[in-house]
Image (cartoon, helix red, strand yellow):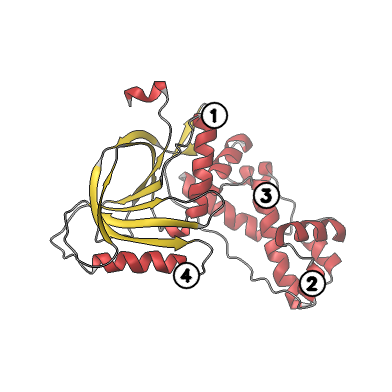
Amino acid sequence: MDHYEVIERALIHIEDHLHEPLSVESVATTFNMSKYYFHRLFSAMMGCSLNHYILSRRLNASVTFIQNHNMSLTDIAYELSFGTQASFTRAFKRHYGVAPSSLRAGIRTISPIPVPAVVKRPIKNINGDIVTDFTLTELNEIRLSGIAFEVDLAADDYKQRIRDHAKILLNQIDESIKGPCYVIYSNCQPNSTQFKALFAIPCDIQIHKPFYFTVDVPQIFCARFKYAGDLLEIGDVLETDFARFLKISRQEAEQSDIELIQVFDDVHNLESTYHIYAPIKKLPADSEC
């Protein structure tokens, strides 16, 4: 089994055994793996420790039990291996911000979350630590033409807004234009959920409409990551991957107007594999890159 399949099967195994004692050692043994390697692999692929994940899934399962009103909170606590109702209530309140009794009374409703998908990306081992594979590289200066817009991550429709603007540009170009396309996210202020975006291609397209721009992106030293899937659906994974990369590689994020750049190989296929370029500071040892 490759590491994707191991983690995918581990998630199913955990979901099927939430009522039993679970530990790193017991789950790793199920897949004939060292508990130390499995712990590092799971944390790298899922962005959290196995114990944290198991706790979150037990609390997720408890939501259905509570809202069905068929079991007492004490029975739910024992069914999901919390030991006591008090420990279950404390964990539930920390996780959801409300007591399970509020859920049972109908004061709040919570929707159970399906088992998460495992985001496919290559990984590497650095001195015993597992991290999403990366390359330190210069992203050369490039001129891009496309549509600019602003997005607020706090708005419910921000994902659809990004996709809609991408379609606006794609509707203005024909199949004869080949090659990559770029999505540049920039100027996200500290503690702000708003940022600017540019969906563009490295072609001189003349579109005389509002919000169409041609910009020169300067050369940037970056960490490059490779993903398959929708960036808008794996944003949390990317965030934890980048934080883990900075910690393990001892690199530092660059203070730049550009937050990150997403590059698709084919402008007409936005479901394809893509690369993420995240600006980082160039250390003396990186000068040879």
Q: Secondary structure at mark 3?
A: helix
Displayed quadrant of residue 110: bottom right
Of the numbered discs in the image, which one, if any, rests on residue 128? 1
Residue drawn at (64%, 68%), measured in percent from left and top? Answer: 112
Which of disc 2 and disc 3 is earlier in sequence?
3
Q: Secondary structure at mark 1?
A: loop
Which residue in the structure is indicated by mark 3? Answer: 52
Which mark lies nearer to you, 1 or 2? 2
Q: Amino acid at mark 4?
A: Asp
Of the numbered discs in the image, which one, if any, rests on residue 157? 4
Which mark lies nearer to you, 2 or 4? 4
Q: Eyeballing the image, is 216 above or below 14?
A: above
Which of disc 1 and disc 3 is earlier in sequence?
3
Q: Are marks 3 and 1 in contact (CB under 8 Å)?
A: no
Left or right: residue 215 compared with residue 121: left
Q: CA distance from mark 2 to mark 4?
A: 29 Å
Nearest the eye: 39 or 12: 39
Residue drawn at (50%, 43%), measured in percent from left and top? Answer: 241
Q: Amino acid at mark 3?
A: His
Which of disc 2 and disc 1 is earlier in sequence?
2
Left or right: residue 179 compared with residue 286: left
Nearest the eye: 123 or 36: 123
Q: Amino acid at mark 1?
A: Gly
